[in-house]
Image (cartoon, rainbow, N blue to C red):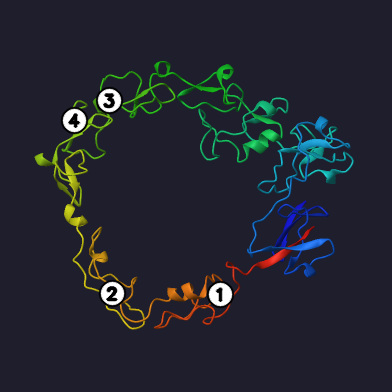
Amino acid sequence: MLGAGRHGGAWVFAFGGLALAVGCGHTKLEAPCRSNGDCATGERCEATTSRTREAIFGPCPYTSCQSTADCTNGYVCGPLPTNVTVQPGQGCAAKACLPPCDPGDAATCPANQICRDTGLCTVVQCDEPGGVACPEHWRCDPEAAPSETPGYSDTTTPVTGTTVVDPKNPTDVVAHGCVRKRCTEDDGYACAFNYTCKESEAANGTGCVATPCEELGGCSDDAIYICTPTSTGQRYNGTDVNGCAFRNCEEGLTCTIEPSPWHFCDPTDATADAIGCAVVPCTEGSPCPTQWVCDPTGQFVDRQGCVRDPALSAGGASGDAGTGSSSGGAGSSNGGSTAAMGSGAISGDSGASSGGSTGGGSASAGRATGGDTSQGGDSASGGTPSASGGTPASTGGSSGASTSGDEPGPGRCVAE
């Protein structure tokens, strides 16, 4: 079992009862230290300026393999145990050399699995004592199960080409040796109306294959598709499963869901869309969308000749200067009224972000004087601001541990 823990700034990882400590360039990582006197004989204190450490994971505790022939000492090649969590960078393969299970001790295998002569635990098959019964529309056939496709549907909609929904966990059902009954079998996966049962040609495990539209006499959705196009106008690319092409407006596809006097079918018109629908220009009465105006010569014009109303993009009035104060200035928050995408918000002379022009500087001056103290000081800037620029962190605010600068943080004992 793989475990991980952190003690005193060092990461330690244990594989079973063996503790393996890893350090940068060393094989042993001990307790924190400030000097060599804090370390054991044969060790020295290696300094670090960082108080936090990224997790360092050791190598995979298992020997990777492709087959049992790759293993030694009586071990067998099998899937990693389900209770093992592989950490990033450990490099464990899908299969590893493991101790063989004991056929006489059921506890050596997980529930619903039994120990085989190969020394590996496998799922109890549907034709074995204690095996699960196959669900409706499935049959027990462990020999065919390895070639059965695990799943097609999302367990809420029918499997492609059929009227049947897969069970909740089709992968588990296949693992127990069950396979789907084909459309040619009693109680098998029945085919959808636009599919034909031809087991020898099917690749999806049901026996159902899409029927060509010429043979079907229609399409999967005749309102959207057409088997033999009657128009040469533009249309969407692609076909349905039966080989039908997308319809365009000359083949009955409507230009708008609700009939509109401003849209009409004409694939040759300059404003025609992908299905051949054109639109009356706004200069001829076609209304523009809300917050748009008719201007065919404008920038970013749409098919009707409409553009975004320029009045909605104009800036607000220029604002007055912010008022300074002796403590650093508390200027106006925005310097004047604003509008969407306008310039009023940035036109004031002295907004709150800049402070006033009189007296002491901002609290950030305390940081410049006192040094970076990301964990120290009540104030985020390292001290209490004042008219003289703020008390530096060295004298103002609560003290805290430094995470940067010249003073090193705790070191670690490493083998010399």
**Mark 2 or 4, closer to the camera:** 2
Q: Dot 2, how many residues are within 10 Å of its Cα: few (below 14), some (14-19), or many (20+)?
A: many
| Quadrant in the picture for residue 38 | bottom right
Q: Between 257 and 289, which is closer to the camera in this rendering?
A: 289
Q: Tell me the residue that label 4 is attached to.
A: 270
- Measured from the top left, where is residue 328 in percent x and y? 36, 79
Disc 3 and disc 2: Cα gap in Å?
A: 58 Å
- In the picture of the structure, the residue carrying the numbered disc 1 is 376
Q: Earlier in the sequence, mark 2 or mark 4?
A: 4
The image shows residue 349 at horizontal and vertical percentages of 25, 70
Instruction: Give above or below for 25 relative to 284.
Output: below
Which residue carries the number 2 mark? 332
Which of pointers 3 and 2 indicates the residue nearer the eye?
2
Residue at (85, 64) in percent of width and height: 41
Of the image marks 1 and 4, the number of the one nearer the N terminus: 4
Secondary element at image label 2: loop
Q: Residues within 10 Å of mark 3 (few under 14, many from 20)?
A: some
Check disc 3 and report the residue beneath it. Answer: 234
State which tag comes first along the sequence, 1 or 2.
2
Mark 3 or 1 closer to N-term?
A: 3
The quarter of the picture where residue 399 lies is: bottom right
Q: Type of residue at label 2? A: Ser
Is residue 134 visible to the viewer in this orientation of the structure? no
